Each structure stands twice: as C-alpha cells, then as structure tokens.
Image (tube, rainbow, N blue to C red):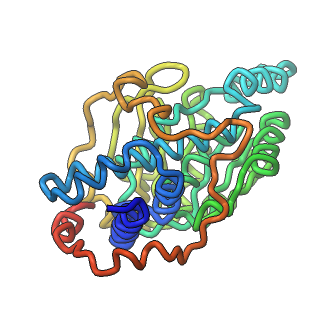
C-alpha cells in the first residue's frame, strides 16, 4: 500500500472521529500535521485500524497522538519563556506586594490535558474558556490546542506575566494550524473584569488564594449560566449560595506538586441541578500522581522538527486530494464504539 493511500485512510479516520466528537476539530488538525509529516507510529496505527481487532485501543492511540503533537507545539510556543523565566517574572512583579493571592504556580501539560479530558464532555459544544490568573498563558493554550472553544481567554493582573503571554501569542502562536483559533489575554483583576461570567468553562489555579478571595470569586461565579463548569485547584468554591454542584474531586500532579482538582457545575436559579451533572457518577476519584514517563511516552518518539521552526505544516490545504484515494473505505465498524463514548 502506498504512503499516499495510508495517509488518505488516516485522514478519513481522523475526520470520522472528529465528526462524531471523539476528538476535537483542533485535534483533527493536529493529527493532520502528524500524518503529513509522516510521523513515527503511523504505520502501526494503520495496521491496528485495518486489523479491526481493538477499536478502543485504536481510538486511544489517536488521542495520545493528538496530545503528543499538542505538547510538541506547546514546547515550541514556550521555548523562549520556560517555567523558570515565568517564575522570575512573577517574582519581579510581586516584590512590592505581600499579597499571597499572587503567588505563581504553573500547570503541567499532561496533567492539565488529562484533567480537561476527564471533566469535559466530548460531544458538548463549549463556547468560551477563561483562565483567571492566567500567568504566562499555558493553560489557555492547552485548552486552545485540544478543544474547540470559540474563544480562549486569560485574565492576569501582573504586568510582566501578562506581557509574556501576549508575546507568546504575538510572536510564537500560528493560528493557521487550527480550526478554532481565537486566543486573547486581558491585563486586569478578575474581580474587576467580570466578562468571564459569560464563559462555559472557567479555570482558576486557586492553590494560594486566601479565603476572602475564594468567597468573592464564588459570589461572582453565581453570574455564570446554568451548566457552566468552574474548575479550581486545591480549594473548592465556598458556595454559600448553594449555586453549584460539586461533581468531581481528584488529585493530579502539577509543576509544584500534587493538587486536588475541584469541578463545579452551575445550578439553575431555582436550585435544581443541570443535566450535565449526570455525566459525573462519582465525585471522589482515585489520585493520579504518576510522573510524566508513567503517563505518556516522551514526545520525542514522534517526528519532531527543529525547535527553531514552528511545528506546523503550513502548506496543507483542507481539501487534500489524498483523501479521495480512500473514499470507498468502510469505517462503519467503528460507529457503535463511537456512539458509546461520552
């Protein structure tokens, strides 16, 4: 079988999985980059598909390939602003302040990606993602790469960290890679900039937030629409108004150590639970504190371009003629499995 035919079959498989919500449209775009670059692991993926012996493992392999490509893009995005630089920028901003709420902590790519995969419903349409206290913007870009939000926004009050996020967006980000592209960073306090209450998904790394700030945040969050998801770290929303259902609680590894993830879903004004709550069967989940090597193979096992160039294949049209080569292939055997997935 020719390489062109192999690529065509994989394009079609990616398109089918995206159509049925198993992977995002942005995930399909990332897979396309891997396929066009003839990345490592593609031949094995195709063999697994054609054998039709383990469709669940095939789908999981494709999801892992999407995450590995997203990780590669993240490494390139932040090549000039690694974690150590972001920490030094935060320290410089905080020298004149004793506010513990401003202590900086950054998300771990694999843990944050895994957390979003665990708590967001794959076939649900999400419009806006907000990160409150977004630092250098890593969580915003992870959400952007892996999910199909119409808009991903970070709100950060510290000048240097906000400027770093803006610089990444302006000089490193290549939106032409993706279907859903909008990324925006706002320099403001999230207590003052209240547009985030129009979000479907809100994230706050609240590990160092003091009790008073958590109460203020909880009060503002009551303005979210029913069904909106609010994710916090280490501390759950106090919720004195009984406006949220706590639907998920689990410890994940982060850059500074373990942190408990709390997921809340906004109730209806009459206090009744949103139907989204039914997707969460058990609130308390077993800890996931495995190290990077236990979670995934190193991304270097996939084809990598030099880090001086963006890992994007910019010459690939969306109507790639290779797809026509496999137009008659039967992918219907995957449909029952896809229908069973959330």
Image: 276 above or below 250: below
Q: Quadrant of the C terminus?
A: bottom left
Which residue is drawn at the image coordinates 42% and 36% (left, top)?
A: 261
Measured as percent of width and height from the top left, residue 258 is found at 44, 22
Q: Is residue 329 above or below residue 171?
A: below
Instruction: Farthest residue to the front: give it.
Output: 2
The quadrant of the picture occupied by the N terminus is bottom left
Quarter where residue 153 is shown: bottom right
Write the residue at 16% across / 69% down: 333
- Image quadrant in which you'd find residue 206: top right
Q: Can see residue 237?
A: no
Residue 11 percent across, percent down from the top left? 41, 66
Left or right: where 32 falls relative to 245: right
Q: Position of residue 238 (x, y in %)?
A: 47, 40
In the image, is residue 227 above or below residue 41? below
Residue at the spot x=34%, y=71% of the render? 16
Instruction: Give the residue at x 49% y 26%.
Output: 254
Q: Nearer the viewer, residue 13 or 220?
A: 13
Nearest the eye: 327 or 234: 327
66 on left or right of 86: left
Q: Is residue 265 visible?
A: yes
Asked whether, in this view, residue 235 is left or right of residue 41, the answer is right
Residue 90 place in picture, x, y as percent: 77, 26
Give 261 or 161, whichever is nearer the viewer: 161
């Amino acid at each position: 079988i020719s390489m062109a035919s192999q690529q065509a079959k994989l394009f079609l498989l990616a398109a089918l999985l995206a159509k049925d919500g198993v992977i995002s449209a942005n995930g399909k775009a990332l897979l396309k980059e891997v396929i066009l670059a003839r990345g490592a692991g593609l031949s094995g993926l195709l063999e697994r598909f054609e054998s039709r012996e383990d469709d669940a493992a095939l789908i999981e392999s494709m999801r892992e390939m999407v995450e590995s490509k997203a990780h590669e893009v993240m490494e390139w995005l932040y090549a000039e602003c690694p974690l150590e630089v972001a920490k030094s920028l935060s320290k410089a901003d905080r020298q004149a302040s004793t506010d513990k709420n401003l202590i900086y902590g950054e998300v771990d790519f694999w843990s944050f990606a895994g957390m979003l995969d665990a708590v967001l419903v794959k076939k649900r349409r999400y419009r806006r993602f907000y990160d409150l206290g977004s630092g250098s913007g890593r969580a915003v870009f992870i959400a952007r790469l892996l999910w199909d939000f119409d808009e991903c926004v970070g709100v950060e009050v510290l000048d240097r960290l906000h400027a770093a996020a803006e610089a990444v967006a302006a000089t490193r980000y290549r939106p032409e890679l993706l279907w859903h592209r909008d990324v925006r960073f706002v320099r403001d306090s999230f207590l003052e900039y209240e547009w985030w209450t129009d979000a479907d998904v809100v994230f706050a790394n609240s590990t160092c937030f003091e009790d008073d700030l958590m109460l203020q945040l909880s009060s503002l969050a009551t303005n979210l629409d029913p069904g909106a998801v609010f994710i916090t770290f280490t501390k759950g929303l106090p919720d004195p108004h009984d406006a949220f259902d706590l639907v998920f609680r689990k410890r994940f590894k982060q850059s500074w150590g373990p942190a408990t993830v709390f997921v809340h879903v906004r109730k209806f004004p009459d206090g009744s639970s949103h139907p989204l709550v039914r997707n969460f069967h058990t609130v308390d989940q077993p800890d996931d504190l495995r190290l990077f090597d236990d979670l995934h193979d190193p991304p270097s096992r996939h084809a990598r371009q030099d880090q001086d160039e963006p890992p994007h294949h910019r010459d690939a049209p969306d109507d790639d003629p290779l797809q026509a080569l496999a137009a008659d292939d039967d992918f219907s055997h995957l449909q029952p499995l896809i229908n069973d997935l959330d």
